[in-house]
Structure formats: structure tokens, C-alpha cells
Image (tube, helix red, strand yellow):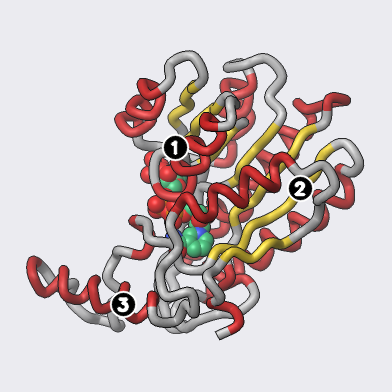
């Protein structure tokens, strides 16, 4: 299985879940040190490819390197993603473009490449979307749009690649990873430091936690379990599966 963004958070937990059920992992990310750390956990069954996936022109060679790692790659988890919290009026072209490249364009292009590689063997793809794709929040216009388009791509790929390739998406609520630990600043606000920063992030996490009826934020493993289930399930395709501790119904 190829897992993008496998160095941290949900991607790393997904890599672990695949290894736990006896699979092989080709981990993609930018941080060579963290990739190597994962490789050393299981040198037989983990291969790594260091790449910046926003560099779209380079994706065919990234895919080629990944597919050469093990014989017969049969799955792809498009997990790498980024979220910039910017309210309308402050969204910069560079930020909009980076989010669309990583969250939307790279998954589509990698899916095309992997589908060709699967050939008649078939395989499975899981895209990591977000509940924000269906219910936006302030400051998420670019991110939510990229994930809503990822949902559309999930269904289009599922339709066109059936019956050999199954394509599904997971829509997580708020999961406790590095992604949600950056302080959300007001326009023009200077980033806080030290204890003030810690207090700000703690308050931010508590506000997010309180919106989940299940009473806690998601853990990366909560999402990884669902991803692995979707990779395996023989009759599920074109689905958008919410895993959010009840956030969407609150
Ligand atoms: N955390 C949440 O609350 C939440 C909720 C809903 C959906 N999601 C989605 O879940 C996915 C994983 O997020 P996470 O929370 O686990 O975030 P995270 O802890 O920040 O991890 C993001 C991963 O993406 C990789 N990545 C970032 N930019 C990259 C680039 N340009 N090229 C290649 N890899 C890149 C990072 O690896 P390197 O830094 O090594 O490149 C890292 O492994 C994302 O698609 C995110 O949108 C997260």
C-alpha cells in the first residue's frame, strides 16, 4: 500500500495499521528523518519515498519509485494534506494554490497513475477528506473547497474505475495531530509566544473538543481503522464515510 503523508498524524497511524494486519507500506512525505524512522520500525515491509507532492510535474517519477518498491502494489491512501486558516479577504493566491495542489490535484494525478499500475489486478484507493467538505467553518474556504472537490473526484474515480478499482473517502472530524495545533490568528495579529502560545492552543483544542458529542477529539488510530476497513471491503466503492465523534450531528 502506498500511503502519502505517512510521516505524522493520520498517515503514520495508517501505515502502522497496515503493518499490523501484515501488509507492506510505501511511505511518502517530505521529512526524510521521520520517513527513515518509520522504515527502521520494519525494514522488511516499509519502503520510503521522500517527495514534495505539491511539485505536480514530479509525480510520475515519484509514482515510478513507489511502484518499484514492492511487486504488485494494490492500494493507495491519499492522506497528505494541509489546512491554512484564513478568513475571506486574507486568502493569498500562494496559499490557495498550495492547498489545491496538495489536497486535490496530487490525489487525482496519483490515482490515475496508480490505477494504470494496478492494471487487471485491480486495487483500492482511499482519499482522506474532511467533514469541512460538507459543513464549512469560518476561515476554511480554500481548505473546504479542496476537500469538497476531493469528494467529487472520489465518486468520479469510483464510477470510471469500477469494477477493478474501488475508491472511497473518509471524512474525519477534528483529530488531534500537528495540523490542529497551530494557533488560529486574527487578521494582523502577532503570533503569541511561550506560555501565552501554550494557553492559546489549549483553549483552541478545548473549544474543538467540546463540539464533539462523543466528548473527545479523534485520535489518528480512530481514522486509520476506518481507512484500512475501506481498503479491504470488497463491495464498498464511491462512499464518503464520516468518522467524527458525532461532530456533524451536533
Ligand atoms: N487533523 C484533523 O483534524 C483532520 C481533520 C479532517 C481531515 N484531516 C485530513 O487528514 C489528512 C492528514 O492530516 P493530519 O491531521 O494527520 O496532518 P499532519 O499531522 O499535519 O500530517 C500531514 C502529513 O502530510 C504530509 N505533507 C504535508 N505537506 C506535504 C507535501 N507538500 N508533500 C508531501 N507530504 C506532505 C506531512 O508530511 P511531511 O511534513 O513529512 O511532508 C504529514 O505526514 C490531511 O489530508 C488532512 O486534511 C485532518
Q: Name the residue under label 1.
A: 29
Question: Which label sits on residue 17?
Answer: none
Q: Could you say where residue 78 lies in the image, as x and y percent from the top left?
A: 60, 45
Q: Do the residues labelled 1 and 2 touch (CB within 8 Å)?
A: no
Asked if the beta carbon under badge 3 is closer than 8 A to the nearest atom of ligand 1, the reply is: no
Looking at the image, residue 147 lies above or below residue 90: above
Whichever of callouts 1 and 2 sits on the residue coming sooner in the sequence is 1
Looking at the image, residue 103 lies above or below residue 96: above
Q: Mark 3 points at which residue?
A: 206
Asked if the beta carbon under badge 1 is closer than 8 A to the nearest atom of ligand 1, the reply is: yes
Q: Left of 199 or right of it: where is 219?
A: right
- Give the class, few, some or many, for how many residues have Cα within 10 Å of label 1's Cα (few <14, many ≥20): many
Asked if the beta carbon under badge 2 is closer than 8 A to the nearest atom of ligand 1, the reply is: no
Q: Name the residue under label 2.
A: 167
Residue at position x 30%, y 63% in the image = 181
Q: Do the residues labelled 3 and 1 touch (CB within 8 Å)?
A: no
> Which of these two is toward me, 111 or 123?
123
Q: How far apart are marks 3 and 2 (CA)?
A: 34 Å
Indicate the quadrant where residue 115 lies: top right
Amino acid at each position: 500500500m502506498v500511503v502519502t503523508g505517512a510521516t505524522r498524524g493520520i498517515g503514520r497511524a495508517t501505515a502502522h495499521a497496515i503493518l499490523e494486519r501484515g501488509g507492506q507500506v510505501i511511505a511518502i512525505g517530505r521529512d526524510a528523518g521521520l520517513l527513515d524512522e518509520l522504515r527502521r520500525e520494519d525494514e522488511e515491509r516499509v519502503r520510503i519515498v521522500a517527495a514534495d507532492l505539491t511539485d505536480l510535474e514530479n509525480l510520475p517519477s515519484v509514482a515510478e519509485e513507489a511502484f518499484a518498491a514492492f511487486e504488485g502494489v494494490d492500494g493507495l491512501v491519499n492522506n497528505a494534506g494541509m489546512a491554512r486558516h484564513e478568513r475571506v479577504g486574507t486568502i493569498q493566491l500562494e496559499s490557495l494554490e498550495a492547498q489545491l495542489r496538495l489536497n486535490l490535484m496530487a490525489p487525482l494525478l496519483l490515482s490515475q497513475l496508480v490505477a494504470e499500475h494496478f492494471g487487471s489486478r485491480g486495487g483500492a484507493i482511499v482519499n482522506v477528506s474532511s467533514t469541512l467538505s460538507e459543513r464549512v467553518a469560518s476561515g476554511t474556504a480554500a481548505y473546504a473547497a479542496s476537500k469538497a472537490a476531493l469528494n467529487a473526484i472520489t465518486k468520479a474515480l469510483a464510477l470510471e474505475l469500477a469494477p477493478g478499482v474501488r475508491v472511497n473517502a473518509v471524512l474525519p472530524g477534528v483529530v488531534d495531530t500537528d495540523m490542529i495545533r497551530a494557533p488560529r490568528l486574527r487578521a494582523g495579529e502577532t503570533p503569541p509566544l511561550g506560555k501565552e502560545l501554550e494557553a492559546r492552543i489549549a483553549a483552541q483544542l478545548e473549544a474543538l473538543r467540546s463540539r464533539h458529542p462523543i466528548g473527545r477529539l479523534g485520535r489518528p488510530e480512530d481514522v486509520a481503522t476506518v481507512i484500512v476497513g475501506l481498503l479491504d471491503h470488497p463491495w464498498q466503492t464511491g462512499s464518503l464515510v464520516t468518522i467524527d465523534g458525532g461532530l456533524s450531528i451536533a
